[in-house]
Amino acid sequence: MTIEGKWEFVAQTPMGEQKSTADFVREGDGFGGMQSGAQGANPVTGGIISGDDVTWQTKVAVPFPITLTFSGTVSGDEMKGQLKAGSLGTFTFEGKRVS
């Protein structure tokens, strides 16, 4: 399974759909990159690949500082999973590799 490339994500939250993009690059046994959305561009950290499952974090500062933790399963060029947004709760997300 490869994670590299540009991905587009949509998370279902109480504030409606939250869209973001990510450019993932392989880093040793894991991955990193940048994730961008309404909160700006932020580094991807802690990228872990375990079979078809992936986990990563990104920290945003807007509207307030919070760490977002993504846990998903990759199937080809698609991904589905959960987004934990600190004390705000856990939400579902879907993603698609676009390049």
Image: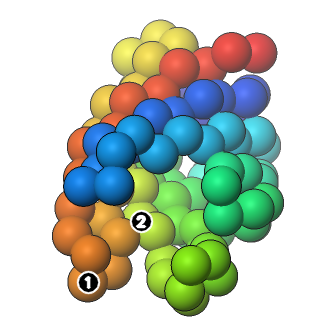
Q: Residues within 10 Å of mark 1 (few under 14, many from 20)?
A: few
Picture residue at 47% right of the left edge, 45% below the top: 18
The amino acid sitting under disc 2 is: Thr
- The one nearer the camera, 28 or 54, is 54
* 46 sits left or right of 81 in the view: right
Position of 80 relative to 41 (above/below)? above
- Residue occupied by mark 2: 69
Give the x, y percent position of residue 81: 29, 40
- Residue at the spot 41% in from the left edge and 65% down from the top edge: 69
**Which is more toward the observer, 25 or 51?**
25
Q: Position of residue 24 (x, y in %)?
A: 72, 42
Separation (CA) of disc 2 from disc 1? 12 Å
> Counting residues from the N terminus, which is met first, the one under dot 2 or under dot 1?
2
Residue 85 figure quarter: bottom left
Left or right of 95? Residue 89 is left
Give the SS element for disc 1: helix
User: Which coloring applies here?
Assistant: rainbow
Left or right: 92 as drawn, with respect to 66: left
